[in-house]
Image: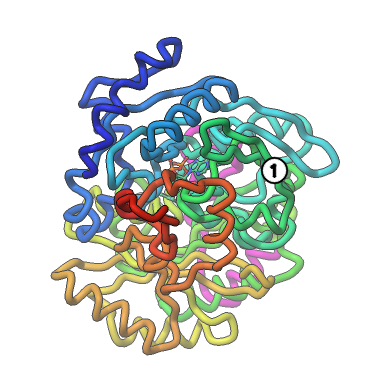
Amino acid sequence: MNTSTLPRATHLPNELPGLDWVTDAARVARLSQDFAWFSPVLKRQLADKTADIAVRPRSEAEIAAVVGACARHAIPITVRGSGTGNYGQAIPLHGGLILDLSAYSGFGWVRGGAGRAQAGIRLADFDRQARPLGCELRWLPSTFRSATLGGLFGGGFGGAGSITYGPVAAPGNVLGLRVMTVEPEPQIVELRAPEAMLLHHTYGTNGIVLELEVALAPVLEWVESIAVFEAFDAALEFSSALASGPGLVKKEVCFLGAPVPAHLGPLAEYLPEGCHAVLIVMAEASQPGMENLLADFGGRITYRKTTAESGSRTLLEYTWNHTTLVAMKTDRNLTYIQSGFEPARHVEQVKALEALLAGEVMMHLEFLRTKEGRVNCSGLQLIRFSSEARLDEIMQIHRDHGVAINNPHAFILEDGKQGQLDPAAVAIRRRFDPQGLLNPGKMRSWKPLTPPGTSPRASC
Ligand SMILES: Cc1cc2nc3c(=O)[nH]c(=O)nc-3n(C[C@H](O)[C@H](O)[C@H](O)COP(=O)(O)OP(=O)(O)OC[C@H]3O[C@@H](n4cnc5c(N)ncnc54)[C@H](O)[C@@H]3O)c2cc1C
């Protein structure tokens, strides 16, 4: 930790007494955490990382006041939505301030198939307010109840809905944003896509996003169902055919190869022993088409409810990384990896890896459209953890089969993105965070400009 920041960060409340400060060490430590503990590697590496103080601004003026003070005193800032990220994105490496935006959560407007809101709005709250206006979000991460719009943009990928609309990153999904610079006198800039996308999935390192404008989907009545199969291949091929069917309107297709279903205790009554399962969320009108396909592959439905009937229990909270979360509750020795298959070969690649690693690697696949619109699947495979060396070997075996790994056991941006970060995303940081104060240590490609005769500030 950069202890030189300590006195300055903790003195911020003297300078700005009207703000909602969090100074209690235990609360600050909680606000310094996210779900990095999913990874035994990150759990070890990030165990002692905490901010010095946190603040919960309620208005743009309050955000500007605190950001300006941090810039004047060179205090690191880690922006936080709800802290559901799972690569330590929201964990400060060098102390300083947690800028908790969860109270900056106003819903703006919906018109012409687009909507706008402040970054701290929870995704569920956005949807609740947009649905009476005929629209809903195009993607819901399984953390939709707590995760924020700004956090999804800053640290997320997509979720339910990505089977139709692709990831957040697909052109046309994010239309624009309002961003604040980190300077003694913070500036506010409106960016439109594609430039706005330079701030996407950069862990809050290259600008503070205040508002987001996103394209929306029309509201539909969704039906949630569980299909079960005796054969792995039949369940996999059904999932791929369902995902590919252009006439079948869907929000979620989640494949869980045995023994993953056995780890989903709360759904046990719908998951016969030893089964392979597919969790499906589809439009009411597409149910007969889905059931015809199911008959072709020898599966059967064990659960079916409309979203309204399912009430507070939605199958979405058993998909994406909620599968990992629920499974880890039954077995703390599990962890996971994230992988991207090749659209043209995904079924063949899954079968090959299942044949090689079954027992140690348990197949969980999320079907989706790629940024370019091709049907594919992304793996969130559960792993029986034995050692960090074996985890690396398992990821390498996937790469050797042509499967990309987005390493969730790394907290540096480039390490999670197979070593690649768009140089333009690094360059834009010079404009929005010239001192490198945002989430320092997470962007390896950033090199501070050090004036001659001064010592470089910690670890940007
Ligand atoms: C159980 C579980 C399930 C998950 N399922 C999914 C899923 O289905 N799909 C998916 O994509 N992800 C998923 N995730 C990851 C995570 O929930 C999402 O990325 C989520 O959208 C993050 O939102 P948040 O508000 O919690 O962000 P945080 O964790 O608070 O922040 C995430 C990153 O964004 C930055 N950030 C936050 N707000 C801003 C802002 N206003 N300006 C600039 N930077 C900002 C933070 O600094 C941090 O680096 C899951 C995680 C868990 C633990």
- Which residue corresponds to the image point at 35% horizontal and 62% vertical from the top-left? 408
Crowd rating for badge 1 (residues with CA inside 10 Å; few <14, some 14–19, many 20+):
few
Q: Which residues are magenta?
A: 289-316
Q: With respect to residue 151, does 17 lie above or below?
A: above
Instruction: Tell how many labels.
Output: 1
Q: With respect to residue 75, does 232 lie above or below?
A: below
Out of 413 and 44, give the one closest to the viewer.
413
Q: Where residue 165 sits in the image (x, y, percent)?
A: 68, 59
Quadrant in which the N terminus appears:
top left
Out of 15 and 380, give the one closest to the viewer.
15
Q: With respect to residue 78, does 337 lie above or below?
A: below
Quarter where residue 173 is shown: bottom right
Q: Which residue is mark 1?
A: 221
The answer to whether residue 194 of the structure is visible from this angle is yes
Q: Residue type at mark 1: give it.
A: Glu
Q: Where residue 171 sits in the image (x, y, percent)?
A: 71, 62
Q: Is residue 97 magenta?
A: no
Residue farthest to the right, as pictured? 112
